[in-house]
Image: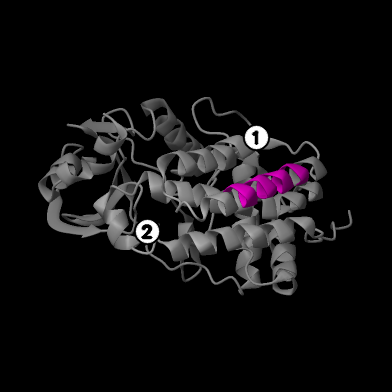
Amino acid sequence: MNAAEDTLAYQDLSPDDILSSVESLGFRCDGRLLTLNSYENRVYRVGIEGGAPVVPKFYRPGRWSDAAIQEEHDFTLELATEEIPVAAPFDRDGGTLHHRGAFRFAVYPCFGGRAPELDDLQLLRQLGRFVARIHLCGQRASFQHRPHLSIHHYGERSRAYLLDAGFIPEDIRPAYESVCEAALDRVERCYERAGDPRELRLHGDFHPGNVLVLDEILHIVDFDDTCTGPAVQDLWMFLSGDRREQTPQLAELLAGYTEFREFDGAELNLIEALRTLRIMHYAAWLARRWEDPAFQVAFPWFGGRRYWDEHVLALREQIALMDEEPLRWATPRA
């Protein structure tokens, strides 16, 4: 299946396909079907007769190998055995990854809740504890089939794809090439200042949208982008606002984190570098999925001149931020 076919594959996924796939694993669907917010994959809430609803997730064809998906599942199951509140797939018919026609899918329990509020410092400390516990498991073994969060994979490859695919207007192209070169140079400097940070298995895309809070109960969801990288990758996306606002947020996250695991303060040099790589990767992700009708509806602003002007400006702002001193954190006294 080529890239265009990968992108359009979901046109062949009907409601009957979804329900019959779930029922093939022994669940009895009651006919209720709700599409959940997901663009990379297709995710639904399905009602179950006499029981709690479940969440089937249909993986985008061509994106991950079966082995890479299985590593995602195995990692979440490992975390669940440690009583970390993650959404792990059901094991049915002797496995967690299932095939139905052209699609691969897994079925998860359904959790309700809202995204955490980033001004809730007590909640940030709790999140820090959970991230540390995830990382304690993450450092026990290594991924063999999942991606590595690297300058090449997220930065250089993204730049090359956008330039080769012709998404950038010709009159903006020189500015884009120049700002990318400068930005990646600063990213490399940030990594040099960080020394040689230890890398481990991560959630990889840990942001407020992947945490569900219901009363006092918290669940961590969507390990689809789990990867190998530095610990700070699972922390920085919970920092918001300017430096003055981020400093106490960071303090609470790390106060919780260091209750369970040591944190290398040198990794703070990577925060703006990782943000820069994410900005570049996000633009390439949109471009790679642009033939998918769902993307054109959800991101109608992508690809126009204004988008690329703002993208270049965002990278220039990141260059300035990477030239500044990193956030400071007072290491707790023993």
Q: Amino acid at mark 2?
A: Phe
- The percent position of residue 201, horizontal first and vertical second, equals 59, 37
Which residue, given by chain and number where applicable, does mark 2 sit on? 111
Which residue in the rendered view is the most extreme toward the front? 171
Q: Quadrant of residue 22?
A: top left
Q: Is residue 178 magenta?
A: yes
- The percent position of residue 293, horizontal first and vertical second, equals 25, 53
Magenta span:
177-189
Marks 2 and 1, Cα distance to the nearest angstrom?
27 Å
Name the residue located 36 percent from the left edge and 61 percent from the top edge.
Answer: 299
- The percent position of residue 139, horizontal first and vertical second, equals 65, 35
User: Image quadrant for the N terminus?
Assistant: top left
Q: Quadrant of residue 68?
A: top left
> Is residue 4 depicted above or below 291 in this figure?
above
Apparent side of residue 315 relative to residue 334 in the rendered image (left or right): left
> Is residue 21 depicted above or below 274 in this figure?
above
Secondary structure of the residue carrying tag 1 is loop
**Label disc, if present, on residue 323 of the rendered structure:** none
Q: Nearer the viewer, mark 2 or mark 1?
A: 1
Q: Earlier in the sequence, mark 2 or mark 1?
A: 2
> Is residue 233 depicted above or below 138 in this figure?
below
Which residue, given by chain and number where applicable, does mark 1 sit on? 139
Q: Amino acid at mark 1?
A: Gln
Name the residue located 34 percent from the left edge and 54 percent from the top edge.
Answer: 38
Apparent side of residue 124 relative to residue 92 in the rendered image (left or right): right
Name the residue located 58 percent from the left edge and 38 percent from the top edge.
Answer: 156
